[in-house]
Image: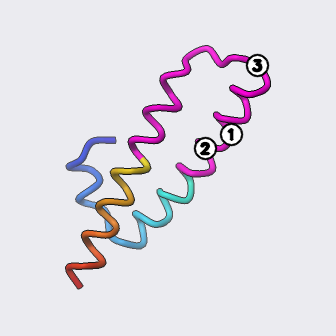
């Protein structure tokens, strides 16, 4: 998800997307702990996307 796409989302959409991504990252970490996943870079990408979502959500909170 690109930054321009993230900025276009509303605060509610950001919160929902953040919830989904956190759940997804939890599943990835669990899968990695059981047996190595095919592409471990997915965990890093997921973590960075969560950080971007949190940053944009906080920026929208401060703007209001």
Distance from label 1 to label 2 (Cα)? Answer: 5 Å
Secondary element at image label 1: helix
Image quadrant where one finds the C terminus: bottom left
- Residue 12 location (% of width, % of height): 42, 72
Q: What residue range appears in magenta?
A: 21-49
In the image, taking residue 29 as reference, residue 10 lies left or right, namely: left
Question: For mark 1, does the 10 Å Cα neighbourhood hold few (<14), some (14 to 19), or many (20 or more) residues?
Answer: few
- Residue 45 location (% of width, % of height): 43, 33
Callout in the foreground (3, 2): 3
In the image, taking residue 28 as reference, residue 4 lies left or right, namely: left
- Residue 55 location (% of width, % of height): 31, 59
Magenta region's main secondary structure?
helix
From the viewer's perspective, is residue 58 above or below residue 25? below
- Residue 43 location (% of width, % of height): 53, 32
The residue that appears at 55% across and 59% down in the rendered structure is: 19
Image quadrant where one finds the N terminus: top left
Instruction: Decide which of tag 1 and tag 3 comes sooner along the chain.
Output: 1
Q: Would you name the residue on which mark 2 appears?
A: 24
The residue that appears at 43% across and 49% down in the rendered structure is: 50
User: Does the stretch in magenta take in 40?
Assistant: yes
Q: Would you name the residue on which mark 3 appears?
A: 35
**Whether label 1 touches label 2, CB < 8 Å:** yes
Q: Which mark is residue 27?
A: 1
Question: For mark 2, does the 10 Å Cα neighbourhood hold few (<14), some (14 to 19), or many (20 or more) residues?
Answer: some
């Amino acid at each position: 998800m690109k930054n321009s796409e993230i900025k276009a989302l509303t605060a509610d959409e950001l919160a929902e997307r953040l919830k989904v991504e956190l759940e997804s990252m939890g599943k990835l970490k669990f899968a990695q702990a059981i047996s190595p996943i095919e592409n471990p870079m997915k965990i890093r990408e997921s973590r960075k996307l969560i950080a971007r979502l949190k940053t944009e959500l906080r920026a929208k909170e401060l703007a209001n």
